Image (spheres, rainbow, N blue to C red):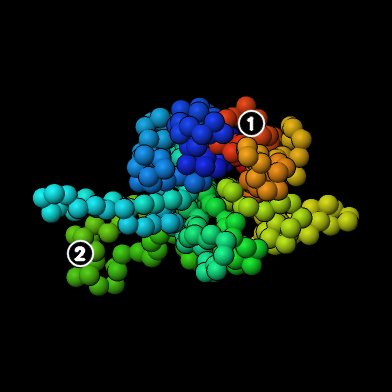
Amino acid sequence: MKLVTYNIRYALGPDGVYDYGPIADAVRGADVIALQEVERNWRRSGMADQPALLAELLPDYHWAFFPAFDMDASSMGADGRVLNRRRQFGPMLLSKHRILEVRRHPLPKIATARSFGMETGALECVLDAPEGPLRVYSLHLTSASRREKLLQVQHLIALHQNAHARGGSWTGKAPEHDPGELANFHAMDWAQGEEQPALPRHTILMGDFNMVPGSPEYIALTGEPDLATGHNLHWDSFADSWTHARDSAGDEGHTWLPDPPDRAPAEPLRLDYCLLSPGLADCVARAWVDRQADGSDHLPYWVELSGA
């Protein structure tokens, strides 16, 4: 299975042109695609519906979108009718496999006095993968402050720890003890003939974490390196696919490149990650950064899993 995560910067390339073709070309062929900074109805991108445009360019994928940031963009026509539009921004996930369930998680936010801060979120999808249901997140953590980011990391860890206690999108069964309620349950077709959703064994987090290796938020997610084992994984945290890959082509895995005029800190950084629940750590065959992509100030980060 091939996974890719790509912060598309609302399809604004380093040349200052909005172009969706290079974005689609850069991720086409992956089994699962996590995108961040996808928007709808922003003036800067011509009021484009970017999720729909990208889905049209990748028609053989199932997809979901989470407008974590959602503001009014409506207008009033001359006839008094409201053109209802929302100015939206958030993560998107596309999958070759059916998306069985979707949950949308707003991440903690602290109001800022100076630096710009906005709502961010994590899009949770359960995929009908060949080896069984797989939980995958496309997410974007804040760049406003480390304090806010650590709150978001703790929220993600809590979601992971409590996944089995929370269960699927619906749980339980028909009220067989009461014939009247049972008849009503079937008449309303609540389950639509389906079994209770199965709980995935594995979880994958993909996205722009706005963190660097060794930072407090990175250690909170992946654990402290152990002097003896190198990577002492805990079941309530995650493995960094880059450090566990049997083959990691390239340099330090840098995925963000400051474009002119040079933006602080004016050097490439590893900000985009694919983090895996520990049971998948030994399945990372390859990890690489696509240095040929030119649709954003980020680069796509790819991971190939085998034997999952």
Q: Position of residue 45 (x, y in %)?
A: 41, 40
Q: Position of residue 64 (x, y in %)?
A: 41, 46
Q: Image check: 95 left or right of 114?
A: left
Identified at 66% across, 41% down, the residue is: 262
Residue closer to the observer: 115 or 220: 115
Q: Which residue is mark 2?
A: 183
Q: Quadrant of residue 254?
A: top right
Looking at the image, do the residues carrying marks 1 and 2 touch, with CB atoms under 8 Å apart?
no
SS at badge 1: loop
Bin the neighbour count of mark 2 within 10 Å (Cα to Cα): few under 14, some 14-19, many 20 and up: some
Bin the neighbour count of mark 1 within 10 Å (Cα to Cα): few under 14, some 14-19, many 20 and up: some
State whether residue 213 is above or below residue 15. Answer: below
Identified at 57% across, 65% down, the residue is: 114
Tag of residue 290: 1
Identified at 19% across, 60% down, the residue is: 187
Q: Amino acid at mark 1?
A: Asp
The quadrant of the rendering that contains the N terminus is: top right
SS at badge 2: helix
Residue closer to the observer: 132 or 204: 204
State whether residue 204 is above or below residue 55. Answer: below
Q: Amino acid at mark 2?
A: Ala
State whether residue 219 is above or below residue 77. Answer: below
Tag of residue 234: none
Identified at 31% across, 64% down, the residue is: 174
Q: Image check: 87 left or right of 254?
A: left
Q: Residue furthest bottom?
A: 178
Q: Image check: 191 left or right of 274?
A: left
